[in-house]
Image: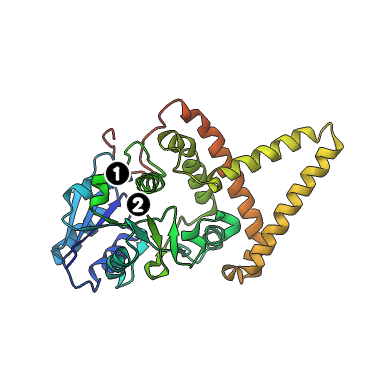
Amino acid sequence: MTTVSFVVPVRNEEEYIRACLQSLVDQDYPGDLEIIVVDGQSSDHTLEIVEEISQRFPNVRYLDNPAGIVPTGMNIGIREAQGDVIIRADGHNMYPRDYAANCVKYLEESRADNVGGPCVTVPADESFGAKLVAAILGSPFGVGNSKFRTSREEGFVDTVPFGAFRREVFDRVGMYNEKLVRNQDNELNARIRKAGGKIYLTPALTTHYHPVKTFWGLLKYAFKTSRWHFFTLRENGESMAWRHIAPAAFLTLLAVLFLASFINAPARESLAAVLGLYFLTGFYFSARSAATNDAVLGLALPLGAFCFHVVYGAGVLVGISYLFRQPPTEPIRPGLPTAPA
């Protein structure tokens, strides 16, 4: 029987970690299963909750991640894991009871090196801001052709979040790149593809994910994440897709047309046409989205997506400077001081 190890890198996840770990200990997998929580210097009650759960469930244990960032935490967990299959879990996610069993099943059936499923984005609470965040991240208009966010189709893809890996893949392509505070999954999956491996997406591995609670929080997340795209491309030129750079091209086009519109009538007309087409497309996707049954939310989605795309594009452009230097490697979340990664 295939043995399974969940590796859960966390930092300040007290709001969701109990439910996440409960969903993992409730797995109905018939074989040996361990859960390794790698704590990145949390300053809230995350570690206390993990300690409490580990006392009740002997297959749960925790390790320390002094660097506080996800790729370092994953590598610590992978080195300690005993499983034939390594599943990256996220402290914000909730997992169905058959998740581990389906990971093993689809690794065997697809012969892929990494399998994963769609992330259904669930509002963090009932506030309008949280619902708007979920609507943007769950819409093709918001996130492009990111299949794990918008598609329920099954098949081979370029990347999946929180994958389930054959353990030997790390011997073949290496571990997580610890230079990458962001985009480390994209980069690892690019190496898997380059080595002839395959990544498989199946709705049978669907999970529910809670993003940030506020629209302002989404914009900060977008800017901080997108700044890493050019550095990630510097590390691995095959790791990012066109959708990651498209907002920067869109923002550049708007800026050029806006400046030219002061002296050129055709530029003003072009700017109006581009913005008109953008918002018409946004309202089209908003009308089709099941997440926007609320009329006010439906009207807000195109404007919210516009702000998201502009900020995301600005982050990509700012990140051009990281083609020539290493970005700062501080953790994504606040917490205790960390050691250098």
Q: Which mark is residue 157?
A: none
Q: How is the image coloured?
A: rainbow
Q: Is residue 262 left or right of residue 217?
A: right
Residue type for callout 2 = Gly
Tell me the element at label 2. Answer: loop
Assess disc 1: are there few (<14), some (14-19) or many (≥20) residues with their C-alpha within 10 Å of its C-alpha.
Answer: some
Q: How many marks?
A: 2
Assess disc 2: are there few (<14), some (14-19) or many (≥20) residues with their C-alpha within 10 Å of its C-alpha.
Answer: some
Residue in the picture at 45% in, 66% down: 154
The residue lying furthest to the top in this view is: 324
Q: Which mark is residue 173?
A: 1
Asked whether 158 or 127 is in front, the reply is 158
Residue in the picture at 58% in, 38% down: 314
The residue lying furthest to the right in this view is: 265
Q: Indicate the position of residue 43 as horizontal and vertical percent values.
A: 29, 47
Residue type for callout 1 = Val
Residue in the picture at 19% in, 49% down: 63
Q: Indicate the position of residue 319 as horizontal and vertical percent values.
A: 51, 34
Q: Is residue 188 left or right of residue 40?
A: right
Q: Which residue is mark 2?
A: 197
Q: Earlier in the sequence, mark 2 or mark 1?
A: 1
Indicate which label's residue lies in the foreground, 2 or 1: 2
Question: Residue 110, located in which quarter of the rendered image?
Answer: bottom left
Asked whether 77 or 152 is in front, the reply is 152
Q: Indicate the position of residue 188 as horizontal and vertical percent values.
A: 36, 46
